[in-house]
């Protein structure tokens, strides 16, 4: 059974009905009661996620409650490891403050990259993927948008919060140069946009169900398909049910599957020592090509 860390700041602020949803999903809750002096974990470890509950203190009360800094460090680690983080009241404020620190760190990093002539010289005009080639190969994600292809599944195939009438405006970032520097630029700008969207969604969050009950059974003999924008681009999910409404077959096509040919094409204009730079500027997954 997987577990999540739960940071609790006051005895009356526990998981409540969230505990039932976790239990039904086979997830255990490991409480850390800071109001009893229990230390905040230094690492996420094998925890699958993090829930930060509310409390009587404020997000900037670190001098009085120094463990809040430890919580922000744990939140930052969970985000870095791409593990889900849920903030409730104070928890959402700590999440927003952590993202603000992350944004400052990102700006500092990009400032050092763009201010270093040696780094810029390695990235500029290296591994160029032309706009038409990106279209011909149906490239997705950062690689496509860095070559001027205005494509994003969150906007083109909206679902969930992105299909809500009150959703925040999604700013799709594109540049036209198509080189490694363009891919770095798009990735950094998209990180900024993601931080902004998290803040917008947190501010709009309202009470509601934590899970959606599926019809029992599912319609039989049907096929469903969806496109979801992942960190690497458009991921396509395909599912087929049998006559009894059970899942008969499920297939996920990763964006890496159809982005890999673009790496070979972009590398044709690069010198051999620059191939690792070209390769990692696309940031693709090797195992995702498994059929």
Image (cartoon, helix red, strand yellow):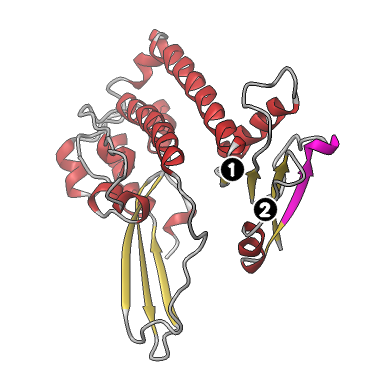
Residue shown at 38% from the left, 91% from the top: 243
- Asked whether 34 falls inside the magenta stretch, the response is yes
Q: Is residue 116 left or right of residue 27?
A: left
Q: Number of marks in the image?
A: 2
In the shown orientation, is residue 282 left or right of residue 269? Answer: right
Q: Earlier in the sequence, mark 1 or mark 2?
A: 2
Q: Is residue 112 above or below residue 230?
A: above
Find disc 2 in the rendering and name its residue.
15
Magenta-colored span: 29-37
Q: Residues within 10 Å of mark 2 (few under 14, many from 20)?
A: some
Q: Residue at x 77, y 43 (%)?
A: 32
SS state under label 1? loop
Q: Tell whether position 179 is magenta.
A: no
Q: Secondary structure at mark 2?
A: loop
Checking the image for residue 88, the label placed there is 1
Quadrant of the frame with the C terminus: bottom left
Image quadrant where one finds the N terminus = bottom right
Say the numbered circle drawn on residue 117.
Answer: none
Q: Residue furthest right?
A: 37
Q: Residue 65, image x and y in percent?
A: 74, 24
Q: Position of residue 250 (x, y in %)?
A: 42, 72
The quarter of the displayed image where residue 237 is located: bottom left
* Residue located farthest toward the left when viewing the structure as drawn: 132
Q: Residue at x 78, y 37 (%)?
A: 34
Q: Is residue 46 above or below residue 42?
A: below
Image-based side of 185 in relation to 46, left or right: left
Circle 1/circle 2 CB separation < 8 Å:
no
Viewer-proximal residue among 185 and 14 = 14
Choose top left, top right, bottom left or bottom right for residue 3.
Answer: bottom right
Q: Position of residue 189 (x, y in %)?
A: 35, 28
State the CA–CA distance, disc 1 to disc 2.
10 Å
Residue situated in front as seen by the camera: 109 or 155:
155
């Amino acid at each position: 059974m997987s577990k999540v860390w739960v940071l609790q700041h006051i005895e009356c602020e526990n998981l409540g009905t969230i505990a039932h949803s976790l239990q039904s999903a086979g997830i255990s809750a490991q409480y850390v009661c800071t109001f009893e002096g229990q230390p905040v974990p230094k690492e996420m470890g094998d925890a699958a996620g993090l829930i930060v509950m509310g409390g009587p203190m404020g997000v900037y009360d670190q001098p009085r409650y120094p463990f809040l800094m430890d919580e922000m460090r744990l939140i930052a680690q969970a985000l870095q490891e791409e593990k889900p983080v849920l903030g409730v009241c104070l928890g959402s404020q700590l999440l927003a403050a952590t993202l603000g620190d992350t944004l400052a760190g990102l700006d500092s990093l990009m400032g050092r990259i763009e201010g270093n002539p040696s780094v810029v010289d390695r990235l500029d005009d290296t591994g160029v993927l032309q706009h038409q080639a990106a279209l011909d190969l149906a490239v997705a994600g950062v690689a496509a948008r860095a070559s001027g292809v205005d494509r994003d599944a969150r906007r083109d195939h909206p679902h969930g919060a992105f299909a809500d009438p009150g959703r925040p405006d999604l700013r799709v970032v594109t540049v036209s140069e198509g080189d490694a520097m363009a891919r770095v630029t798009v990735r950094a700008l998209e990180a900024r946009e993601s931080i902004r969207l998290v803040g917008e969604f947190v501010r709009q969050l309202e009470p509601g169900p934590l899970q959606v009950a599926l019809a029992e059974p599912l319609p039989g003999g049907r096929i469903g398909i969806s496109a979801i924008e992942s960190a690497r681009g458009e991921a396509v999910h395909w599912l087929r049910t049998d006559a009894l409404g059970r899942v008969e077959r499920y297939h996920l096509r990763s964006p890496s599957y159809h982005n890999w040919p673009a790496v070979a094409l972009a590398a044709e204009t690069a010198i051999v020592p620059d191939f690792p730079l070209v390769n990692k500027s696309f940031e693709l997954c090797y195992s995702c090509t498994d059929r």
